[in-house]
Image: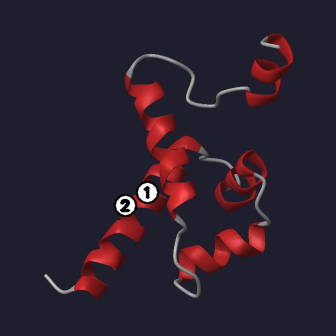
């Protein structure tokens, strides 16, 4: 399989997972959760910009939490507030 096909497949898989995690307002909700503008998420989705590695790490971690029976939407702010 060619590299472009691999990239396209990875992007499709990435957004399939994101849609499962954020079924309502996928791009807006995901963008708000990771602190990225919806327009940037849209550019990742349509291929104008590649999905950055950090976004893939966030989604992989969320899926790992979900598969382990935990809420995938980690409350990061409370974690730092509650753990000095």
Where in the figure is residue 82, as x and y percent of width and height? 82, 11
Q: In the image, what residue occupies the spot 43% across and 57% down? A: 16
As drawn, 36 above or below 46: above
Residue that lies at the very extreme toward the front in this rendered image: 84
Q: For this view, does 71 lie left or right of residue 2? A: right
Tell me if mark 1 has few (under 14), some (14-19) or many (20+) residues whose alpha carbon lies within 10 angstroms of its own.
Answer: few
Structure colour scheme: secondary structure
* Total number of numbered discs in the rendering: 2
Q: In 3D space, how far apart are the residues under numbered discs 2 and 1 (Cα atoms)?
A: 5 Å
Q: Which residue is located at x 56 percent, y 29 percent? A: 72
8 is higher (above) or lower (below) than 78: below
Q: Nearer the viewer, residue 75 or 22?
A: 75
Residue 79 versus residue 50 in the image, above or below:
above
Residue position for label 2: 13
Relative image position of residue 34 (x, y in whole percent)? 71, 50
Residue 74 image offset from top left, x and y in percent: 65, 27
The residue labelled by disc 1 is 16
Which residue shows up at 75% across the image and 58% down it?
A: 28
Image quarter in which the C terminus is found:
top right
The extreme right residue here reads 81
Instruction: Give the class, few, some or many, for how many residues have Cα within 10 Å of label 2's Cα (few <14, many ≥20).
Output: few
Coordinates of residue 33 in the picture (x, y in percent) = 73, 45
Query: Residue at the location (80% across, 22% down)?
Result: 80
Q: Which mark is residue 31?
A: none
Q: Secondary structure at mark 2?
A: helix
Tell me if 9 is positioned left or right of 17 in this view. Answer: left
Tell me whether circle 2 and circle 1 mark residues in contact (CB < 8 Å).
yes
Q: Classify mark 1: helix, strand or loop.
A: helix
């Amino acid at each position: 399989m060619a590299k472009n096909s691999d990239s396209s497949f990875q992007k499709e898989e990435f957004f399939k997972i994101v849609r499962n995690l954020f079924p309502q307002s996928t791009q807006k909700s995901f963008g708000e959760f990771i602190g990225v503008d919806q327009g940037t998420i849209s550019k990742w989705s349509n291929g104008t910009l590649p999905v950055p590695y950090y976004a893939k790490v966030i989604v992989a971690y969320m899926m790992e939490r979900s598969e382990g029976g935990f809420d995938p939407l980690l409350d990061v702010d409370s974690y730092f507030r509650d753990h000095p």
